[in-house]
Amino acid sequence: MEKIIFMQTNYEKQEEKAKQDNSSIIISDSVFRKFFIEVYSITIFTLRFFKEVLKPPYEFNELMKQSFLIGYKSLPLIVITGFIIGLVLTIQTRPTLAKFGAESWLPAMVAVSIIREIGPVITALIFAGKVGSGIGAELASMNVTEQIDAMQVSDTNPFKYLVVTRVVSATLILPLLVIFADAVGLLGSYVGVNIKGNVSAYFYFSQVFQSLEFADLFPAIIKTFFFGFAIGLIGSYKGYNSNKGTEGVGKAANSAVVFASLMVFLIDMIAVQITSLLQN
Amino acid sequence: MKKSTSNKMRLGIFISIGIVLLILGIYFIGEKQQLFRSTFRVTGVFKNVSGLQIGNNVRLSGVNVGTVDNISIVSDTSVSVEIMIDENARQFIKKDAIASIGSEGLMGNKALIINPGTGGKKRIESGDIIATSMPIDIDSILMKLKTTVENTADITGDLASMTRNIESGKGTIGRLIMDKSWRENFETTFINLRKGSTEFRILMEKANDIDQAILSVKEAIENTSNITSDLAKITASIESGEGTIGRLLMDRSMAQNIDSTFIKLKEGAAGLKILMEKAKSSWLLWGF
């Protein structure tokens, strides 16, 4: 932390000096500097997380409480979204498949889409919106009201108590939520198939599982751990390092959502590359 | 404290259901790949596997009974395919079963199809090498198709030159279609034909009257045949010397009688002549 403050003051001095030379170069220069300083801070924050997560004592009760708040409380939202996504995807896909006379492929296609991509990504985005912003705002307001400083004074490790529990619970809970979203999404898809046809549930789900392979399921589940970790970590980072003042709370919540959503897509892109590399 | 316990219970239920769903998903996907059933393995060696992949279905009489477990190239002309088959299907697959590579649909995946073999043979054992047959290679079909297309191109080329000739009025058909004088000739021919057919119709109507004439001719012919048969009878009786004419013509004695009659008449006539001459010189008849 001291290092960062030092870097920032040093950078301010340089900025003032450069102002005299050329203003346009300063803007790009400052953006780059800010970006790299942010990268540095996040890396330090992540490393600190890994250092703290393995070190006892473990805050199990807080972890359970956070898992309940993050996971269980998000379940209705995730389930409703999953159902609608499955239903809509099926209804939207049907005309395209009907053009090729391949309506019988509908369960297979929707199942692969939901399990591989749509289930994990949509759930992660909603999770980022609900939980990422929640963690960011909560920690930022604690920071503003100096509760974090108070914890430090009272010999409680605030990082361990606040950040580690939230990041771990987000990492562990998101895959579970994705499994729920996938299951409900397939149910929604079954309803969607039955809107314009008459397919028994047994036939539908046997078609679904015929089309799926472990290569579809496992990479999709594994990447959701990374999604959860990224969302929890970014939310916590933004909240923990927020500016003092009420403005800082809103800013922390907002940037947590934006940055976490972006990270979800970045991780997804990397995951798909790794999956396709492993499959070939 | 009470609230915290109920929250923990809810969280527990949530996690349990999530894990159960995951296990169910794994089970059902694994079930398809026969992970939780007793299976046996056989190996088939193909020259070309036509894009068969690990995990493709193995079919016996159209029923999925297993999956392709491994594919490895043994040499430049042989590919070894390890097949995992459900133990329940073993009783139907005999030692002389043949594996071939087909496809699940027009656009679908490849599938390994097992022909079960003849009834009298022993069951296949785990680790056996199954006989294989060459899959229908789409490339060879395409090669044949290429020849067909080339032939079609030749034919269409010929057709094009033919139609060009027709258009330019060459050959009989060309002249028929394009030449004006031919067309006029044909028109007149057709007009004549039409006239002819009208006259033919009139003729046919008249033919009804001819029927009557033919009937009377028939009658006449019948009468003639009667006359000739009578004539035949007459000549036959003449020939046999019956009747006056017959006897006249055929009876010798009669002829002799006639002859002698004529001789006598001749003699009588000569005597008469002499008598007449004598009478002429007689005085009694001087005044005559």
Image (cartoon, grey):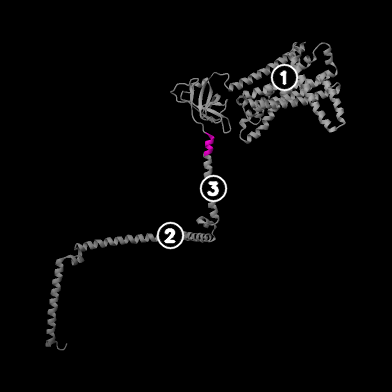
> In front here: A180 or B257?
A180
- The amino acid type, in three-letter code, at marker 1 is Thr
Q: Is B196 drawn above or below residue B276 in the view shown?
A: above
Q: Residues within 10 Å of mark 2 (few under 14, many from 20)?
A: few
Which stretch appears magenta?
B137-143
Magenta span main SS:
helix
Q: Residue at x 40, y 60 (%)?
A: B212
Q: Residue at x 54, y 52 (%)?
A: B163
In the rendered image, residue B21 lying in the magenta stretch gets the answer no
State left or right for residue B158 relative to residue B215: right
**Picture quadrant of residue A27:** top right
- The amino acid type, in three-letter code, at marker 3 is Thr
Q: Which residue is mark 2?
A: B207
Q: Which residue is mark 1?
A: A171
**Picture quadrant of residue A34:** top right
Q: Which residue is mark 3?
A: B156
